Amino acid sequence: MDRRSFIWGMGGFFVGASLSGGAAFAYRELRRARFRASLPPSPPPAFESRGLVDGWILSAADRERIGSAEYALQSELLEIVDGSDIPGRPFSREVVKGVDDCVEACEKETRCTRFTFAKATHPDETKRNVCWLKTGEGEADSPRAPDYISGWRR
Amino acid sequence: MVFVARSELDLSRYDAIVAGSGPAGGSVAEGLSRGNRKVLVIETGGSEYRAEAQENYSAVKGGGHYVGSHWSSHWIRMLGGTSNIWGGWCAPFSERNFDRWPISRSDLEPYYLSAAQALYRPPDFLTYRKSVLDQFEYRAISDEDPLRYSDPVKFATFPNDPNVHVLLEHSVGALTASQDGSRVEAFELYGVSEGNRELIELREEQALVLAGGAMGNAQILLASNDGTRASIGDEHGQVGRYLQEHPHMGVGKIICRANALIPSMDEGFGGIRHALFPSDSLYHEAGELDVCLVLSEASIDSTDQTERYLSEEFGPGARAYRVSVMAGRAENHGSRAEGFDPCGWPLLFAQCVVDSDSLEAVDFVMRSLGSSLLDSNVGRLRFDVERVYSDIGGGGHTIGTTRMGTDATSSVVDSDCRVHGYRNLFIAGSSVFATGSCVNPTLTIVALAQRLADYLAKGI
């Protein structure tokens, strides 16, 4: 066998192999998609991380005070007020560890002119530790909302 | 201490032969010498550390939570044995830690005192206890420079002691029982450098003391098998069975008022570490597995909101401590010998598992500590619960392979550290611990060895 026909032979082999491999892959994905559609939603993981961060054994009063603006990061850019849900247009909603993270996130994001953080003690479980970054200007005063901390650019 | 060569040695002239020169063997030899007895100490290693000797004669296969090298690296083959890598922490077992022993703390009390002295410790830490919190008691762990039993200056009477001879680079191998099985009549002496073996006969009154570490003692007994009957001391399958280690883990942080948990200690205590122990009632609730909570100074993380709050709440001068645990037990769940090491002795296989009872005891005691701090409002605890279950280490506290008991069907040695049924065979070291408490074993090793030496000096 000369060199040229060897190269052609090998080339043909690889082209054939990749064509049939590709077809098999596409077929498998198709089957998987159909199969998955008929499955019930997957259960939550059995061993969820309990989180090293919040391992402090605290009283309810501790939690309330830690969650207040009194112990929030001091920010040079933002004025922070406890018990306030400042109006604005939210463009981001994230669950964070504490108000510190929300202050930091707003400081770093140039679009963010104000933020609102829902305390860990918020009666609505779905809102606890949620940080909304917002745009908006004007009147920063807002009705008293004890479950929130807000801040705005000075 | 006089070093001797095999060629100039008459083994029949000694009252006792001790296998191993670490804290156990060294203390037995020292005590016997004080009783004016002549002792030969046989050490597998040399006067310096040699990696080759270590590799050849400390091999262990590991399974479960601890790999083989964990055991090997705490079984040092050189003059002074494992004292050469000892960290220096000393604490006595408390009364409750002797619940399943045939002896009590009071039997050991005078020896704890002399052991502290031998290890250059002021003795106050032996008895000092202070209740600092509901359900928790403060005790000090002595932390002075560790005594190396290879140290020619510090190791007490050894330097010029004509009663103690040391034969290096030789090892005690298989033992031979007498026909009636009432004593050991001979042992194999293995020359490490030449690889030669000879059979040494023991005189009727000579005592043989195994002090080769918890792994070494089990290995010598398991090697003592002529193929016709069970190994010496293993007639009821007890050798190696109760191997234990103290699970170690870093489990949290405390922020509290100044002086709330740690009493201001007298300088007479010397170097100390601070530890909290559960009260007796909490200990019973935790399943009688002891937990030692070691507190080390830490700093307050001012970037953390909770820590900022706690430092103000418990200030001024609030203190932070890291909490690490030495706990309960990790126990052998597997077979005991598998294959052979380079000199033909059984290669030990340690399948040591930290059981759920131990983990739950730590979990329970930590939560109780958190509640006590909260209720008394002197501080708060951060409990890193995941680390209890997923980040387990060990202290090199190899314990329990030839445990002490009254019944030969559930133990290897009696309360005099004599192997059940063999009138001239004794064991020194942590291998005889019936249970392991939760504190560092060296002080108890030395105390038990001194007690054995007293017994032998009177009886030989």
Image (cartoon, coloured by chain):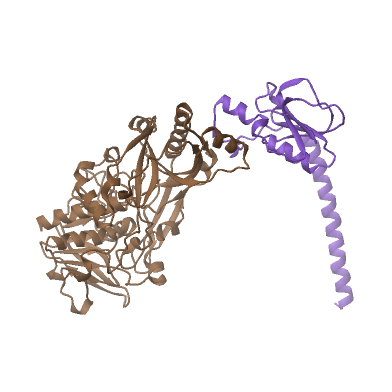
- Residue B196 visible in this rendered orientation of the protein: yes
Query: Which residue corresponds to the image point at 84% horizontal and 64% vertical from the top-left?
Result: A13
Chain painted in brown in the figure: B
Q: Position of residue B410 (x, y in %)?
A: 26, 43
Mark count: 0
Specify the quadrant that holds the C terminus of chain B: bottom left
Q: Position of residue B115 (x, y in %)?
A: 24, 53
Give the answer, above or below, for where B453 lies relative to A119. below
> B305 left or right of B40?
right
* Front-most of residues B392 and A15: B392
Give the answer, above or below, for where B294 lies relative to B209. above
Q: Quarter-wise, where is residue B189 in the image? A: bottom left
* Front-most of residues B376 and B186: B376
Q: Position of residue B414 (x, y in %)?
A: 20, 47
> B367 left or right of A101?
left
Give the answer, above or below, for where A16 lies relative to B298. below
Chain painted in purple in the figure: A
* Front-most of residues A111 and B328: A111
* Front-most of residues B108 and B132: B132
